[in-house]
Image (cartoon, rainbow, N blue to C red):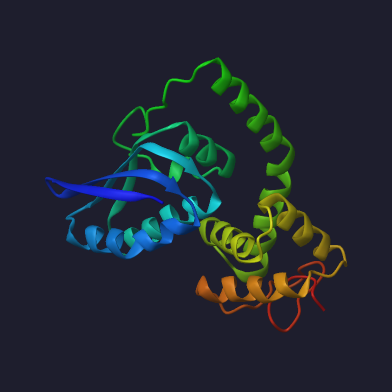
Amino acid sequence: MATLDVLPDGDRMTVTLWGELDLGGRRLLPDLYDILALSGSGVDLYLDSVGFCDCSGVNVLLDLRTRALDQGKTVVIRCAGRAVERVLDLTGTRELFTDATRPDGGAPRADADQDGLLTEVAQLRRAMQTRPTIDLARGILMASFSLSPEAAWSVLVRTSQNTNTKLHHLARELVGAVHGSTLPEQVQRQLAAAVAGAGTRGGTAAGHPGGAAEDGAPGTG
């Protein structure tokens, strides 16, 4: 399980995380929210000691960032280990946690040995195969529910997490629903709940192919 340490640094808070940043990391959110509230301009994260990170962990970071934006603050990843770097790359969320004032983006990459490089290559090859479908599914959610790119990503991650479905499998089901197939009932429920949690009205965009059921999930009618 992930643990954290915090150190004030001027008008920002420096937070160091270590352990595993996964679904269990959500228990850290109340503390992270309190730390954010105490900061003047935001939080700097040091994640180089995080040994494991998955989409649930990224969702924790996205929730913290959303809270920061509501307060006019920022969340910047200053340092990240290989596990975090890989997930940020595969999910396309790295740029959300960079510092625009620094030319290096605020998140230096960790040195990788040969085995690590081979693993990254394999992961990136898989990403090349799955990201187009994920991006298409995110676009469907954006068009159907008037979501921002970030909110659509959050809906995908939450639904994947709550249905125990791999993200690219969920994306493929959503794309299929637009073409007339039916989403599993559990996915319909969790998708509708995630959209509601994103603060949308749950309506569909005019002319959206495949339509939507009354609960707001594409292609469930």
Q: Residue at x 79, y 69 (%)?
A: 183
Q: Is residue 104 above or below residue 97?
A: above
Q: Is residue 35 above or below residue 133?
A: below
Q: Residue at x 42, y 56 (%)?
A: 25
Residue 64 position by quadrant: bottom left
Residue 196 position by quadrant: bottom right
| Left or right of residue 68: residue 148 | right
Q: Residue at x 64, y 72 (%)?
A: 190
Q: Position of residue 101 (x, y in %)?
A: 29, 36
Going by the picture, which residue comes out furthest to the left?
10
Q: Is residue 83 above or below residue 53?
A: above
Q: Position of residue 156 (x, y in %)?
A: 61, 60
- Which quadrant would the C terminus be assigned to in this image? bottom right
Going by the picture, which residue comes out furthest to the top?
114
Q: Residue at x 57, y 79 (%)?
A: 201
Q: Position of residue 17 (x, y in %)?
A: 33, 45
Going by the picture, which residue comes out furthest to the right?
180
Going by the picture, which residue comes out furthest to the bottom?
214
Residue 207 position by quadrant: bottom right
Which sits in the foreground, 24 or 35?
24
Q: How many marks?
A: 0
Residue 160 shows in this picture: yes
Q: Is residue 103 above or below residue 206?
A: above
Residue 217 shows in this picture: no
| Left or right of residue 145: residue 64 | left
